[in-house]
Every structure is written in structure tokens, then in C-alpha cells.
Image: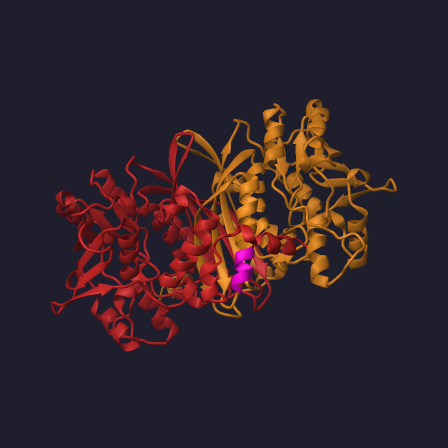
Chain colours: A red, B orange
């Protein structure tokens, strides 16, 4: 049996550390927080070590015969499948489009892998395909290759979708944590917490006076407008699982820089704030699907902010903080009442299966 | 709710036909046979219509800034996870490597998306990662980007893996069904039925005197050797789900040509034949994961066959038939006892979750 062979060969696999702490996979291993990062850092990265993977970015930047490409993948397991502002199909397109955009790439082509559960109503599948068709059109990408698998009833959850994407990189500069510089200004493209709270509200059967709609949207047009305007973007990332807090901690740790943000500058809609209070969530840790942070040299910040605010996806853009090269590589937040605290990555799991 | 919006907008979605025959997804929709083709032809293709998808090939052939690439994806849901000759990890690498090879591309980069079920033993995940590491090394590809999601206990089946792959196309000629020509000779790279029967034997708890090992292997080195030798390959495909029969029917239908094969020329190991008889399967419909058929001009056939036989992955290569431009676009087989019959695509599902 190969399984035995593999067992014997496991001595060559030098990363059994993290799971000895946890004998099996927990929901939090997929939550975008500390546990997921341990899984990646201690199991996946050592096994598949290469420069692209080690860049710890949303996608890999590749050079094939002189053509520079970004390549990325995400699986989507959101529950429920439909929520205000989108569904698993819109997420599957926009999520991967946005990961390409975060590399500074123009998204071009997507693949789609469907894992369907026996018994999924045909009508549900049809609605999801329609959403994907519309989202792909809106984002200007072509779905060029795909795969369908069906698993037995009770061995799935209706439908899981994986998309992978290829984009064309526009510039020579590597956009990513390694390019973050001291004195970079941090811009956030809009209000946070809507996607996570829209999904949670449906899941918990809550209704509010103002319905919370997911912010799910393609970010590529706005990102390409920034790059085309000659703004020297050093790093971008979309704060999905784990929210804005986890994203900033990731960048602080990967870049080795201290990030300082101002809580009062982070836009949050009142209904999102209210829902977070009812359900006991901190909006800084709630997932977004149409927002990004950009690290930009101070000289370009005002121009970038004006450009973002003139774009449909960036109307509420704000300057939320800056980068310092003194002090430890953490995220320090000045709270609304004037104190400061260190912001940690999401630990454990508060919002499982949000994307 | 967007779900309602989508419902209203569904009038723009012009392919509700196939599922009106079947109100929900069945296992057979993932089986590689007639039902899966209906799903693709009548739901996915009309929704995402574009030339790459319509080529109905194992991968999309793309041109990005003058660089020609192949792009493909597959999800892997095989059960059990470990079987003689491989596991879900080796399959996830080799399956996607082989789809790239079938386009005539040199596989370069893979993505991996993991959907883990809460409670998956850490040791199982570690063994699968190790297998992927080894398989990627053997196939000469780098895993450059990835994603991990965790679903609740009872909403998965341990682990599902999606891989997408990018390869560099070597030549101008499109390799695919549209390039099949009358008088092309059909070569098969080795014996058939091993992968499917290896998995089924474990699943059914059968043991035979000679253990059946999956043929799971990367085909790219052999394929590139054929191309490098200047052999004018018109079409290649690896007969996975649905087996050799479904693959040939697919090519006959896509190319509009008649395919004629000789049953006696198709190598099948005695233990595979025996297992098929016990379990009631026709080896022509059983999945393979390390075999391919190649459509080659008659003038190159002997040279191609010799080259294949000199390669570890092609030692049992044989000439199994040829293409004709007379008669309907079907597969006609001369049986061992001298009669002829039309071979149809797999209908229904005989071997669910074989890859």
C-alpha cells in the first residue's frame, strides 16, 4: 500500500510541529487568524518551499518566457449560499479577481472547480452560475476552464467552488509586504465589516431596520486606476477572513515594520456597528469582500485618496494610519478614547465559513 | 435580498434545459459520462461562452502578451483517501500535470486549494502534503499559491483538494479534437483500468493474489519527448473518469470523425480483467490516471510507438485504432471475437468519486 510507503517516508517531511499541538483540524484552522497562519507557516510552506510561496502574498508573481503574471486560488465554502449583496458565485469570482488585483495585476482568466453535493437543487446551481456569469462580466474576466465533481449526499454542503486566476502584472515593482517602507501611509478603500455581518445576520436570522448588504465587489478597476495614475503602491491587501486587524498584523509581521492606525479613522456603518455589538463581534476582525488597504508613500497619499474617492468602489476611502520603522513589528491602534493598544491577529474562530 | 434579485434576473440565463430533466444533482453528474457532458454542454458552456471553453479540451490555451500558456483545473474528491499506488495528494498533482500535458504544455506552476473537514487527523493531512511534495518534485512543477478552508464536521469527507495549473505551450499547432484528421492513428500509452480498480478494490475490501496498483503517474515527460522528437501530435487525452470509452466518444463527437478501435489491441492486465468481472465493470469505462491516447498521422506512428515504449510511462504502448472521415461521428469497436459494435459514453455512474 502506498499509504504505508508514505507513512514510512514521512521522516522526510520536516514540519509535524503545529499539529502536535492539535491532533486534528479545527474550524479555526480556516478562519484567517493565528491558527490558520500556523498551519500555513509550519505545514504548507516547508513542504512546498519556493520564493513565490514564501512571499506570503495573496497570489504568486511569476515570469514565464518574459511575461509577468500573477496566479492565485481560493475555495469558497460560505454558508448560507445566498446572502444580501451576493452569493457563493459572486464571491468566487470577486474573491479571486481581488487577490489578483492585490498583486497589482489585471485579472484576465479564471478557472472554476465545482464540488456539488448529490441532491443540490438544479435551480440553486442555475442561480449560482448566473451570478458567476454576471460577476465575471462585471470584472472583465473570462472563465476559460473548469471541472465538476459530485460527492454523496451528506458529504458536502450543497456546493463548494474553487476558482484560480491568472492576471497580467503591469509593473516591475513587486507589490507586497516586502516593499512596505517606513513613513508609508495606509489607505483603506471604504467602510468595514459588511460582508461578515451580512452573512451572520442571515445565519442568525436577525433583521435590522437597515439591511446590511455584503460589500462584495471587484476591486481591479480601482486598483488599476491607481497604478495607471503612477501612484507608487508598495503593498495592497483585501481584508477578508480575519478582517482588517488580521490583515494588518500579517503585513506588520511579513514586512518587519510597525503599523500604527487610528480607530476613529476606520469607517464603520452604524448598522454594522450595531450588529457587531448585538452578536459580540469586533468589526476589526469581521470579513470584507470589496475593500482593500494600500501602503503608499506619503507624497502620493493625497492624490491616491482623491482618486479612490472618485471611484465607485472607493467613495469612503480614508487614511487610517502609517508605517514606522521603530519599535516591534506589531499593529498599534489609537482608540477612539485616546488610549493605545496592540492589535493581535484573530485567534480562534468567530465567523466560520464566511467565504 | 440579492438571492431574490438573482431569481428575478434568471430570465437572462438561457440554459435551464438539462436540469428540468433532473430536478437536482445526481452522483452521475460528476461521473465523466453522458450526464456530466449534458451538465457542461447545457449549463456551463452557454453561461461562460468563450473560445477557450468551447474547445472542450482538458485545459484552456491562452495567449498573454505573446506568451502561449495552458491553464487547467481539477478538484479531487477520491474516496478512500489512500489506495495502492497513490493517494488524493498524488492524484491532485498528477491529474492537473497530465491535463496540462494533454494540451502539449510543459507543466510549470500549480495552485492548491484545500477544503478540510473539522476533525481531519493532522497525521492524515501531513501524509497527503508529503505525497504532494513528492509528486510535484517528480513532475517538475512548483506549487506557488494556495488556500485552506475548513468546513464543519459532517459537511465534508476529510479532505477535498483543488489544483489549477499553468504550463508553457511549446508549439503553434493546436493540440485537441479540432486537429484530429482522417487516417490519424490512435496510440494508447499503456494498459487500462488500474486506477479505478485499485480504488474499488480498497473500497469493496477485496484482495487479489496480485495487488492492483493505481497507474497514477505524471505523463508530461513522455508527452514532451514526443513533441521534442518532432512528432506531429494532433490530439491527446488522458482517459480518467468515464474511462477509455468515454474519452474516445468525446473526441469523436468534438472532432466530427469516426473512431475505429480494436478491442484485442487494448492492453488490460489479467488481475484488472478479473476484478472487473467480479465487480461487473467493463474496463473500457474504468478510470486511469497515468495513461493517454494520442492521435498521430500514420507516417509518424511507428516512430511515436517506439519512442513511447522506450519511456517508463509508455512501455506497453499500443496502436489501438484509427480515424475515418466516413460514417457518423461515433466509436466503432471490433471485438475480440470479430464482431463490431458502437461504443457509447458512460451513462449513469458506475464508479463514483474515483478521482
x and y percentages locating residue A84 in the rendered image = 34, 65
Residue at screen point 78% across, 54% down? B276
In-front residue for pair B177/A260: A260
- The region drawn magenta spans B121-127
Asked whether residue A221 appears in the rendered view, the answer is no
Magenta includes B123? Answer: yes
Q: Is residue A213 left or right of residue B302?
A: left
Q: Is residue B177 left or right of residue A191?
A: right
x and y percentages locating residue B342 in the rendered image = 76, 44
In-front residue for pair A94/B206: B206
Residue at screen point 24% across, 46% down? A180
Q: Is residue B278 left or right of residue B251?
A: right
Magenta includes B90? Answer: no
Asked whether residue A60 appears in the rendered view, the answer is yes
Residue A260 image-quadrant placement: bottom left
Residue B247 image-quadrant placement: top right
B55 up-or-down from A272: above or below: above
In-front residue for pair A249/B167: A249
x and y percentages locating residue A320 in the rendered image = 17, 57
A354 up-or-down from B73: above or below: below
Q: In which quarter of the image is the N terminus of chain B?
A: bottom left
Amino acid at each position: 500500500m502506498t499509504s504505508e510507503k508514505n507513512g514510512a517516508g514521512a521522516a522526510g517531511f520536516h514540519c509535524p510541529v503545529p499539529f502536535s499541538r492539535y491532533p486534528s483540524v479545527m474550524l479555526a484552522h480556516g478562519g484567517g487568524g493565528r491558527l490558520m497562519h500556523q498551519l500555513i507557516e509550519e505545514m504548507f510552506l516547508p513542504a512546498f518551499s519556493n520564493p513565490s510561496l514564501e512571499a506570503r502574498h495573496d497570489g504568486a508573481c511569476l515570469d514565464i518566457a518574459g511575461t509577468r503574471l500573477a496566479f492565485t486560488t481560493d475555495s469558497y465554502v460560505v454558508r448560507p449560499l445566498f446572502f444580501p449583496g451576493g452569493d457563493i458565485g459572486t464571491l468566487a469570482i470577486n474573491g479571486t479577481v481581488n487577490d489578483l488585483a492585490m498583486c497589482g495585476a489585471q485579472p484576465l482568466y479564471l478557472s472554476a472547480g465545482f464540488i456539488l453535493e448529490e441532491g443540490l437543487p438544479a435551480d440553486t446551481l442555475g442561480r449560482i452560475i448566473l451570478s458567476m456569469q454576471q460577476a465575471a462580466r462585471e470584472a472583465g474576466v473570462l472563465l476559460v476552464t473548469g471541472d465538476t465533481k459530485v460527492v454523496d449526499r451528506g458529504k458536502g454542503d450543497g456546493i463548494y467552488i474553487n476558482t484560480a486566476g491568472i492576471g497580467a502584472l503591469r509593473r516591475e515593482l513587486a507589490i507586497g509586504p516586502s516593499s512596505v517602507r517606513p513613513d508609508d501611509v495606509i489607505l483603506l478603500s471604504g467602510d468595514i465589516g459588511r460582508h461578515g455581518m451580512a452573512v451572520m445576520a442571515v445565519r442568525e436570522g436577525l433583521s435590522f431596520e437597515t439591511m446590511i448588504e455584503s460589500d462584495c465587489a471587484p476591486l481591479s478597476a480601482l486598483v488599476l486606476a491607481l497604478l495607471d495614475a503612477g501612484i507608487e503602491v508598495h503593498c495592497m491587501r483585501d481584508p477578508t477572513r480575519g478582517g482588517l486587524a488580521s490583515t494588518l498584523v500579517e503585513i506588520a509581521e511579513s514586512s518587519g515594520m510597525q503599523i500604527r492606525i487610528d480607530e476613529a479613522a476606520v469607517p464603520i456603518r452604524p448598522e454594522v456597528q450595531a450588529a457587531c455589538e448585538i452578536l459580540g463581534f469586533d468589526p476589526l476582525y469581521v470579513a470584507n469582500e470589496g475593500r482593500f488597504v494600500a501602503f503608499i508613500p506619503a507624497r502620493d497619499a493625497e492624490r491616491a485618496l482623491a482618486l479612490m474617492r472618485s471611484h465607485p468602489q472607493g467613495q469612503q476611502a480614508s487614511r487610517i494610519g502609517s508605517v514606522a520603522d521603530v519599535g516591534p513589528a506589531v499593529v498599534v491602534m489609537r482608540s477612539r478614547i485616546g488610549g493605545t493598544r496592540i492589535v493581535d491577529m484573530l485567534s480562534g474562530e468567530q465567523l466560520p465559513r464566511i467565504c
